[in-house]
Image: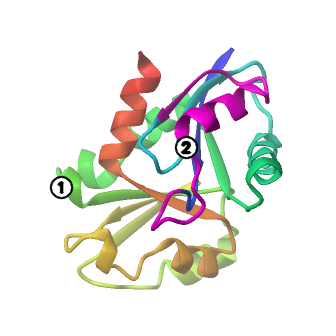
Amino acid sequence: MEKFIAILRGINVSGQKKIKMDKLRLLMEELKLKNVQTYIQSGNLIFEYNKVIDVELPKKIGEKIYQNYGFQVPVITRTLSEWKNVFDNNPFLKDRGEDISRLHVTFLADKPKDEYLNNVNKFNSPPDEFIISGKEIYLFCPNGYGRTKLSNTFFENKLKVLATTRNVKTVKNVLDIANN
């Protein structure tokens, strides 16, 4: 069994796409996910799964939610080691020591194509900054994520890939739960 993290985009936000976490845990157990835990109401799942790599897992989770709730939920998964890597290698935290409350990570479902990366890397939106590394985008938003132009929608439109964002405090807390 390997530990995984699944992040669901857009549930329990402003009264939309409501899913109670206890019901979500039970639903995920129907997919043979083991020891399912959740962190806060915004769709962070920690679980064990018997397949090391299952590229269909995000789709299976999304379909299960759709079957039971009737709405689409984008899902992105990472292994525990990938998640740990994301936290440990955040350049704004590791190299610059920025305030963790101003840091976010946008998780991408797939690695973007070079042609899209080249276009988005030319974009500048001071004082906000971003660094793309593989399937993650590290964000520094000194005035808060709510004020940045570097949103999920921005990156999805520019990179042509599904995205969802978590603040670094959430990334760390999920990592702590997964490590216990």
**One can see residue 88 in this view:** no
Residue 31 included in the magenta stretch of the image: yes
Mark 2 is on which residue type? Lys
Asked whether 179 falls inside the magenta stretch, the response is no
Percent across and percent down for residue 53 are 77, 31
* Front: mark 1 or 2: 2
98 horizontally vs 13: left or right: left
Which residue does the image show at 50% across and 37% down from the upper left? 83
What span is in magenta?
A: 12-38
Q: Residues within 10 Å of mark 1 (few under 14, many from 20)?
A: some
Q: Residue at x 41, y 64 (%)?
A: 131
Local secondary structure at mark 2: loop
- The answer to whether residue 74 is above or below residue 86 is below
Helix, strand or loop at label 1? It is loop
Residue 113 visible = yes
Q: Which residue is mark 1?
A: 98
Q: Mark 2 sits on what residue?
A: 20
